Image (cartoon, rainbow, N blue to C red):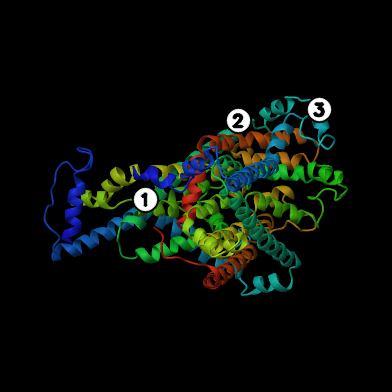
């Protein structure tokens, strides 16, 4: 019960109040009527400004979508939105892939990496967060501070030693260097988010279970995990998107084209075709974005509210 | 002791039957001798749950950091063992490497201009959206979308196209009589194009600001209005102080995030850091030195300079926060 609450309170729960204010009864004293009129004008201006702003902000994405239907000759000539001679040729070219590897292979690699990241991140972050939020043990304070510290640590400080480590383990050009860290809760952001969430959960239930003789494993699995499901979903979505977008990791560790995920494949398009095959480059970029756009449309509530709660409780 | 256990027992009845604890074994009340054993078991459980994180923390963060500090004092190219050269790498960085100096400069400009502008855009739109609830949800989502993809290679490719010669931006500006040409090929304009990309992802911060605005008690505004404060005064006296912890938090994370920009600079410059080194951000320079030139020791020194700079900026922010960040007691 309380889980769904934690999400809705931060959102626009107060809409009914405003709606009531707007639906005012018709007969009004003159001053009030003027006020209502002013209010209406303000609302219209508000909508116009925001629609203009939305058009500006989303223009790059809309441009990208339409550009995928432009034949190569139109790039640099027709910078408008709508293609003059729309074609599906770009998509056919992109399906063939690049560097002798078909597009579906890049897609598959991205999917494997992102799925593994989701599984690893959710499991390891939830375990760590439970220890930080619900267990009183020696060293808790200092380890928690250390975890917060890694939240602020620039990742680049460790890429060289990490690379050397995975190189010594013979894991270059495999997915392991990209997957293994996810199972070790290296993204402090997710641990932090789950700790914040778990701390909000009432303690009555686990205390009761405690008295009944339940251990931490049981409390974690039977009480906490069901309660924090919305936060776990938020973590899952974000870790998927981050893994899907990750560029530096695959750039460092994957060397043969058949192991490339989409971002590195896009780099090939970007490198090979300085201007010659703009159509394929742009279309491949769009194709790579589709899963994220779908995720966004389907899960936007989790994403937007997840960000809202996480940021506030910091 | 007794109060908590009775309360727990009472609420315990509300637990779903059967799934949890059907039988009750240890009904013995907490006693002194058992206390220590319990504490020991708690510690064991704590480290058990933490074990994956601990492995990652020490194996992939702390030990690598120390090793990278060591490497920064060596010359190392993977093939031969590291050779200790003392402070040579650092001395070379600051006295004999114009590329590094330029890289540090443009990174600082990017971070110190891009982040505040992004925050200002986020705050402005959050205030705008907070004016009205009905219909705001759609705009909130629309503005949020770019922040999910702004760091991706796809968007960098789009940016490159948008800001190229005769691209949509160039064409639109030419229409108004401003002939700037392509931005991505122009050393003076490529950094602004990168900053615009950074600002474009204001949506996530805006969502956080908006949630913060919603939590400011209405009474504060009413009281300020009664005292005759106009909109600007209300903003300065109520909104800013109440929102300052959220602003602080986002400024800190925004700056740290901006230092790590990599993919967009790499793609826009085709991995070169050009034109004229103007997209050669510190992470890109580190990558090129370490992984293209094989100067691992030198790259480790760059990484440590980055770490120290980030730490200094974080320290300054934390120190100045008492001057402008307002923490109110009531957090519900």
Residue at numbered disc 3: A84
Viewer-proximal residue among A134 and B326: B326
How crowded pointer 2 is (Cα within 10 Å; few <14, some 14-19, many 20+) is rated as some
Q: What element carries label 1?
A: helix
Q: How far apart are marks 2 and 1 (CA)?
A: 34 Å
To the question of a shared chain for discs 2 and 1, the answer is yes
User: Is residue A212 among the parts visible in the rendering?
Assistant: no
Separation of marks 3 and 1 at Cα, in angstroms: 55 Å
Q: Is residue A69 left or right of residue B30?
A: right
Q: Mark 3 vs mark 2: give the one in front.
A: 3
Q: First in sequence: mark 3 or mark 1? A: 3
Disc marking residue A104: 2
Q: Residue A127 carries which label?
A: 1
Crowd rating for badge 1 (residues with CA inside 10 Å; few <14, some 14–19, many 20+): many
Please state, as top left, top right, bottom left or bottom right, where the C terminus of chain B lies in the image: bottom left
Quadrant for the N terminus of chain B, please.
bottom left
Q: Mark 3 lies on which chain?
A: A
Q: Nearer the viewer, mark 2 or mark 1?
A: 1
Marks 2 and 1: CB-CB under 8 Å?
A: no
Q: In this view, does B133 lie to the left or right of A81?
A: left
């Amino acid at each position: 019960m309380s889980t769904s609450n934690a999400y809705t309170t931060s959102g626009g729960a107060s809409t009914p109040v405003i709606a009531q204010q707007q639906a005012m009864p018709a007969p009004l004293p003159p001053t009030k009527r003027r006020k209502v009129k002013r209010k209406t004008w303000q609302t219209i201006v508000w909508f116009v400004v925001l629609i203009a702003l939305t058009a500006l902000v989303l223009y790059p994405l809309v441009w990208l979508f339409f550009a995928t239907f432009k034949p190569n000759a139109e790039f640099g000539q027709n910078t408008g939105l709508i293609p003059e001679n729309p074609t599906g040729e770009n998509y056919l070219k992109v399906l063939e892939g690049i560097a002798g590897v078909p597009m579906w292979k890049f897609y598959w690699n991205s999917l494997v990496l992102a799925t593994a990241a989701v599984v690893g991140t959710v499991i390891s972050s939830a375990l760590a967060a439970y220890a930080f939020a619900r267990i009183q043990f020696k060293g808790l304070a200092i380890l928690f501070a250390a975890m917060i510290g890694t939240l602020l640590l620039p990742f680049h400080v460790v890429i060289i030693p990490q690379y050397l480590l995975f190189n010594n383990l013979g894991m270059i050009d495999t997915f392991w260097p990209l997957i293994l860290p996810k199972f070790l809760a290296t993204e402090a952001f997710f641990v932090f988010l789950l700790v914040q969430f778990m701390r909000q959960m009432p303690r009555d239930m686990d205390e009761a279970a405690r008295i009944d003789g339940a251990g931490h494993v049981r409390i974690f699995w039977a009480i906490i995990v069901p309660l924090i499901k919305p936060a776990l979903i938020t973590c899952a979505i974000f870790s998927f998107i981050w893994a899907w977008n990750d560029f530096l990791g695959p750039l460092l560790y994957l060397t043969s084209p058949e192991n490339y995920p989409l971002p590195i494949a896009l780099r090939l398009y970007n490198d090979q075709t300085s201007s010659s095959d703009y159509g394929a480059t742009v279309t491949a970029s769009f194709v790579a974005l589709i899963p994220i756009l779908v995720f966004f449309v389907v899960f936007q509530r989790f994403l937007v509210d997840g960000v809202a709660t996480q940021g506030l409780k910091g | 002791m007794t109060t908590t256990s009775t309360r727990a027992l009472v609420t315990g009845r509300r637990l779903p039957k059967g799934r949890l604890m059907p039988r009750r074994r240890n009904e013995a009340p907490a006693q002194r001798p058992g206390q220590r054993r319990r504490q020991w078991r708690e510690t064991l459980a704590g480290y058990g749950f933490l074990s994956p994180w601990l492995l990652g923390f020490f194996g992939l963060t702390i030990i690598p950091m120390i090793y990278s500090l060591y490497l920064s004092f060596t010359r190392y190219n993977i093939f031969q063992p590291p050779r200790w050269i003392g402070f040579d790498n650092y001395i070379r960085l600051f006295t004999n490497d114009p590329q590094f100096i330029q890289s540090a400069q443009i990174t600082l400009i990017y971070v110190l201009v891009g982040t505040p502008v992004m925050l200002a855009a986020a705050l402005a739109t959050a205030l705008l959206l907070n004016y009205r609830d009905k219909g705001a949800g759609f705009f909130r989502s629309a503005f949020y979308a770019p922040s999910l993809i702004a760091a991706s290679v796809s968007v960098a490719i789009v940016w490159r196209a948008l800001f190229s010669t005769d691209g949509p931006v160039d064409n639109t500006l030419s229409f108004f009589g401003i002939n700037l040409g392509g931005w991505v090929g122009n050393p003076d304009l490529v950094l602004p194009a990168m900053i615009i990309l950074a600002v474009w992802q204001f949506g996530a911060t805006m969502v956080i600001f908006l949630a913060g605005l919603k939590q400011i008690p209405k009474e504060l505004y009413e009281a300020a209005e009664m005292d005759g404060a106009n909109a600007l005064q209300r903003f300065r006296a109520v909104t800013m102080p109440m929102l300052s912890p959220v602003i602080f938090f986002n400024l800190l994370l925004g700056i740290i995030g901006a230092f790590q920009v990599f993919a967009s600079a790499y793609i826009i410059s085709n991995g070169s850091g050009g034109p004229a080194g103007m997209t050669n951000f510190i992470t890109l320079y580190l990558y090129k030195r370490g992984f293209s030139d094989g100067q691992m020791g030198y790259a480790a020194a760059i990484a440590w300079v980055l770490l120290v700079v980030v730490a200094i900026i974080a320290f300054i922010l934390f120190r100045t926060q008492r001057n402008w960040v307002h923490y109110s007691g009531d957090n519900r």
